[in-house]
Each structure stands twice: as structure tokens, then as C-alpha cells.
Image: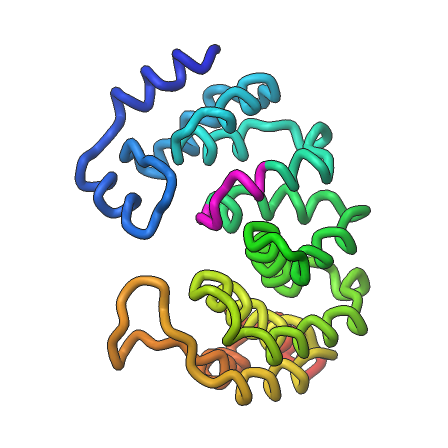
Amino acid sequence: MKINDVIAWLSGHKDERIKSIYQKNNPIEVMGVKLTDLREFAKYIGMDQDLADDCYDYPLYETKMLATMICSPKLMTHEKIKQWVMKANQTNIVDQGIVHLMLIDHSSYAKYLSWCTDENHDLRYGGFAFLASYFRQADLNEINIHESTNLLSHIENTILQESLIIQNAMNNAVVMAGLHVPLLVMKATEVAMKIGYILPLKVKNSCNIQSASDYLVRYQDNPKYSRVARLRQQKG
């Protein structure tokens, strides 16, 4: 399959209603294909790194997202992932597509964490998106507590200086630390209280303003949403 075949398939599955939803706050051109349909198409294609590279180079949200689904994790080096993150323009291509590739690459965890303090804003976004998933999904014995504590302090001290989208990524990382890493619960709780409320990316209203503290209080004892709660439940 070639990139022209991909574009033809996307054209045949586009939906104007989906396009209007996906295009909101999305700096990359959207055709309007459901992610569920895109995943089914990815299964049909299978793993194809050459096509993935062509898809990611194409200036379309769906082709870039598809690329993250059909690429070969073994061929996604740290440098290639870095390039993809910088081209993702701080969209959910990072959160829903690239981060799972980053989590596979255990040897580069320290490099991905270093992006949280990089001068490049696209890499900072990628770093904090990775940090949240790192707290939620990485084995506890792989989580660097010292570095993580420093990054939580960094969030506390710099969050108000960042763009809204990076603030939201930082806020999410604090929540994930408090819900999923026992040794970081106290630190995450302290940071959450200090940073207070962060405006949401989409709708600003009294019901939709994000507080890491509120999330932690709401879910910290729920084993469905908290690894910390599950571990306590198992010990009890």
C-alpha cells in the first residue's frame, strides 16, 4: 500500500461532523475520520515502517495518527520519536499515538524525562505527556523517584509560565503521580494544592475547571482508577 491509497481510503471514510469536532483546537489539517475506523484500517495494513514514514510526512492529522499505529517499534529510535513529537504540534498525536512508543523504549526513559525542561515547547509538551503515562503505566521499580520528585517541583515552580496546553499536560502528570506511584503521593498532593486550578483546553465554565487536588481526592481510593488504591487493597 502507498500513501495515495491511504489518502483515497481516508477520503472515502471522512465525516464532516467528525471533522468539525477534531479540528477544534487542532493546528493540523483534519479530514474527519473516526479514530476507531483509523485503528481498524491500521489493523488491515499491518506493520509497515516505510508507509508510516510517508504517512507522518504528509500534512494531515489522520495520516500522522495512522503512522503511529503501523510503525515498527523496533525502528522507532529516540531520534525518530523526537522528530515525530516536534512535528505533532502539541496535539493528541503525542498522547494517543507516540507516547506508547516511548514507553516501549525503556533505555530512553531518562532522555524523554529530560524533555520536560527542554527549551523547545513541542518537546516540553512531549516530555510531560510522557511523564503522565510513565507514572501511570511504568513498572514501579523503573520509576526514578528522585528525578520524578524534582520534576514535580519543577511543575510547581513553572506551570504558570507555560502555555495552556502544557499547563494541562503538567497538571495531568501531577494527578498520575498521586494516583499511581505510592512514593510520590505526598509530593504530588503538595504540588496539586499549591498549583490550584488550571483552566481547561476547551470550555471554560464553573463545572469544567481542572484541579489536580480535586481529581486526587475523587479517585485516590478507587482501585479502578488508582494503582496506589489497588496496591492498598491487595495488602489489606
- The mark tally for this picture is 0
Residue drawn at the location 27% of the way across and 35% of the way down: 32
Task: Tell whether position 90 is magenta.
Answer: yes
Residue 185, placed above or below residue 86: below
Residue 103, placed above or below residue 9: below
Residue 50, placed above or below residue 37: above
Residue drawn at the location 71% of the way across and 80% of the way down: 235
Residue 130 in the image: state x and y as whole percent. 62, 55
Read off the magenta span: 84-92
Rendering quarter of residue 181 = bottom right
Q: What's the image's color scheme?
A: rainbow
Looking at the image, which is closer to me, 191 or 227?
191
Q: Quadrant of the C terminus?
A: bottom right
Residue drawn at the location 59% of the way across and 75% of the way down: 158
Looking at the image, which is closer to me, 85 or 213?
85
Q: Is residue 169 visible?
A: yes
Q: Is residue 229 visible?
A: no
Residue drawn at the location 47% of the way across and 32% of the way down: 64
